[in-house]
Image (cartoon, rainbow, N blue to C red):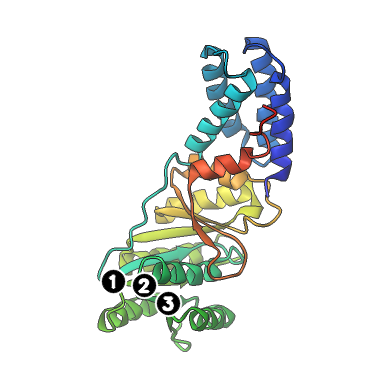
Amino acid sequence: MFNNLQDKLESAFKNLKGQGRITELNVASTIKEIRRALVDADVNYKIAKDFTDKIKDQAVGEKVINAVSPGQLMVKIVKDELTELMGGEEAPFNAKGNPAVILIAGLQGSGKTTFSGKLANFLKTKKGLNPLLVAADIYRPAAMEQLRVLGEQIGVEVHIEQENKDAVSIAQTAVASAKSKNKNVVIIDTAGRLAIDEQMMTEVANIKNAVNPQEILFVVDSMTGQDAVNTAKAFNERLDFSGVVLTKLDGDTRGGAAISIKYTVNKPIKFVSNGEKMDALDVFYPERMAQRILEWVISPRW
């Protein structure tokens, strides 16, 4: 993950290696390379330009102290700005309610169902909650079966109504069932499509209106890059979701979605998901992700 971006950023910072101080000339060269690295990582050009303009404004105005090389100072500025671009701080997650309702949305193949299982496992094992998973994908029987199997793996009950073709009704019945069974959180796995369509948007919006969720999480395959950001924008316009989940970060992702999505929709990334194991879910920390992106650049040789 991020290997190509890391290589290109390291190349960009080499412009400052051995320099005694930061000047407008060497900063301009470095900024140009950073911008190119971001665009190559599938970050929108406008975002990359705004980002590098901020770095330039800070770098040119900095007085380099003797103990810090220009390279080290520039890496710190980039890390701080990258952290801010991805959200700044850990975003809160609201799992309080009677029960709390968490609505999961996204395109087919983004990893919604697997994430729903991981989130249930996370809330059960790390937060001490008693979740109920809800199979509200009425179009793919395989999705219901997948959720049932995941529920068995983690010891979480799954609400399934195979004959019911009304997703809104399924969600409402599940919430009522959760109350009667003293479940304190309900996770609703909704249907996805291969592309955005009106039927899909209307259905998930109707579910939202019917159950009034505490959290609406948009699950996005980080390997789809800029397309993922565009899809998030379309979903947000209809759902006004509360947070983003990035899946498949263990794959050959260029990093564009992780870097750009907060800027585009102004909604925080709340979780990142790697692999298929049910414990492979992490809370998203922007600073740690920035560190991860720059880990190859940040080294003693700077």
10 Å crowding of disc 3: few (<14), some (14-19), many (20+): many
Counting from the top left corner in percent of width and height, residue 74 is at 60, 23
Counting from the top left corner in percent of width and height, residue 42 is at 66, 42
Q: Do the residues labelled 1 and 3 touch (CB within 8 Å)?
A: no
**Is residue 223 rendered to the left or right of residue 201?**
right
**Is residue 258 rendered to the left or right of residue 284?**
right
Question: In this orientation, which residue lies closer to the viewer: 195 or 272?
Answer: 272
Residue 32 can be seen in this image:
yes
Q: Which mark is on residue 167?
A: none
Disc 2 secondary structure class: strand
Question: In this orientation, which residue lies closer to the viewer: 199 or 98?
Answer: 98
10 Å crowding of disc 1: few (<14), some (14-19), many (20+): many
Which residue is pictured at 44% across the width and 86% down the height?
A: 161
Counting from the top left corner in percent of width and height, residue 246 is at 55, 55
Q: Which mark is on residue 186?
A: 2
10 Å crowding of disc 2: few (<14), some (14-19), many (20+): many
User: How far apart are the two marked residues, 1 and 3, measured between alpha carbons?
Assistant: 13 Å
Residue that label 3 marks? 134
Q: Which mark is on residue 99?
A: 1
Label whose residue precedes the other's in the sequence (1 or 2): 1
Q: Are marks 2 and 3 in contact (CB under 8 Å)?
A: yes
Q: Do the residues labelled 1 and 2 touch (CB within 8 Å)?
A: yes
Above or below for 290 versus 214 = above
User: How far apart are the two marked residues, 2 and 3, measured between alpha carbons?
Assistant: 7 Å
Amino acid type indicated by mark 2: Val
Amino acid type indicated by mark 3: Val
User: How far apart are the two marked residues, 1 and 2, measured between alpha carbons?
Assistant: 7 Å
Disc 1 secondary structure class: loop
Above or below for 20 versus 229 = above
Circle 1 or circle 3, nearest the eye:
1
